[in-house]
Amino acid sequence: MMRENVAVPKMSNEHLRYLSKLKQKKFRLQEGLVIVEGKRTLEQLFAWDIKAKELYIVESEPIVSAAISYTVSEQGMKRLCDSEQPQKIAGLFSLPKPRKIAFKKAFYLDDISDPGNLGTIFRIAAAFNIDCLILSPKTCEISSPKVIRASLGAVYKVPFFFCEMEKLQELKAHIFALDMQGKIPLTNFAPPSEPYIVALGNEAKGISSSILKIAEETLCIPMPGEMESLNVSVSSAILAYTLSLN
Amino acid sequence: MMRENVAVPKMSNEHLRYLSKLKQKKFRLQEGLVIVEGKRTLEQLFAWDIKAKELYIVESEPIVSAAISYTVSEQGMKRLCDSEQPQKIAGLFSLPKPRKIAFKKAFYLDDISDPGNLGTIFRIAAAFNIDCLILSPKTCEISSPKVIRASLGAVYKVPFFFCEMEKLQELKAHIFALDMQGKIPLTNFAPPSEPYIVALGNEAKGISSSILKIAEETLCIPMPGEMESLNVSVSSAILAYTLSLN
């Protein structure tokens, strides 16, 4: 054990200073790099064969992998990681990159503003095989540590690209909108055999009137209880699950 | 407008100091009071006829209701509210109280530790008529502002009570457990006509072995994609929705 510990160098103060600046959005985007923290997320990324550029572990921990680049103090890990109580392991990754793909089944996310919601929807999309997520340009930053954490790494797995709502029709897919006041309950919805997109609205504003104008049909989640609305990640979950059963 | 503003007194510094202490869990539990912020949550509570003891509005805002007790400065509102960017309106409420009820369909939440998840599950339970939520004693504080906000007030609507796992069988209900490795896919699950409970596990640890021992059957959410697991509030959403269709 001792020998293994000796073999992994301690991170220099200079490197730590550089990496800790990646907590700032501006610096992340400039460098194209982000710190991803936590064992579960890293394991999920490795299962998908998504590789870290460097791996860091708290110095009191056993060296779990030959791929560990540096040890850091607990304090150092706090400087690297965005969460208040970071885990013992973190890695350096390129930012998740948009890529336009041919899809059969996609979601359009209209100005999702909460990082937790955005990440959760990526995780849902990976779980239920949504082919890709199409994001409005005003969506919150996809490469923020909060989004990556909530997605359990799925921002690296699920293809995504940006598209203005006005250009959605150019994608030549059927467009549907999910709305509390939608006409077709999910239970009655038969998805088309051609490519299709279901649009989901912003947390506060709901689905926008511009989306409603271009949507072929509006769908709703039948909700027997007295509740004003559902959280957008909850709606996404029910929608993605239901579509996976077709 | 001016006259209406004059009619509502400005909150005294003394009262503000007292109320701002309610951000501390200890003080909340001692006083039995909590500040609930935000227009949407308050509107949902009023729709359920759940009344505020006092209502506060930022002094620059129009007095939207005769029920407003005091105006406060923007700074004052920040001292009252737990969120970083509080909304313009907040109210003072009694803490949500546990009550044991006869149920047909309940969830057992085993040590949910994230306030966002706990609140979201209450909101889901209200939306899909889960009769009550049974909470393990180690569940995170239900009356924290974060939980109340994520629940959109549903902690006041959905009956809940605490129960140790060891005493769950005394409730004389069928017990099922939702687990990634569960045997019966939700799509094949026919809920019994007698009262039943579905248990959901902690975010990090998943379903506990003690629950698996007392569960009649284990259920799973069929998940075609490559993803280690689902977030517990996402699982709850799919489960509650599916059960509402029976």
Image: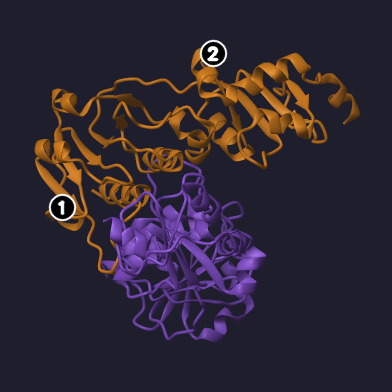
Chain colours: A purple, B orange
Q: Amino acid at mark 1?
A: Gly
* Residue occupying image coordinates x 33% and y 46%: B203
Q: How packed is label 1: few (under 14 Cα within 10 Å), some, or many (20 or more)?
A: some
With respect to residue B42, does B205 lie above or below? below
Of residue A88 and residue B104, the one placed in the foreground of this image is A88
State the image coordinates of residue B91 (x, y, percent, origin top left). 63, 26
Question: Which residue is more in the foreground, B125 or A225?
Answer: B125
Q: Residue furthest right?
A: B2
For marks 1 and 2, give the CA distance.
43 Å
Q: Secondary structure at mark 1?
A: loop
Image position of B138 (left or right of B7): left
Quarter residue B55 falls in: top right
Image quadrant in which the N terminus of chain B is located = top right
Chain to which the residue tagged by mark 1 belongs: B
Q: Position of residue B211 (x, y in %)?
A: 16, 37
Q: Which mark is residue B182?
A: 1
Q: Which residue is mark 2?
A: B31
Give the SS element for disc 2: helix
Residue B36 badge: none
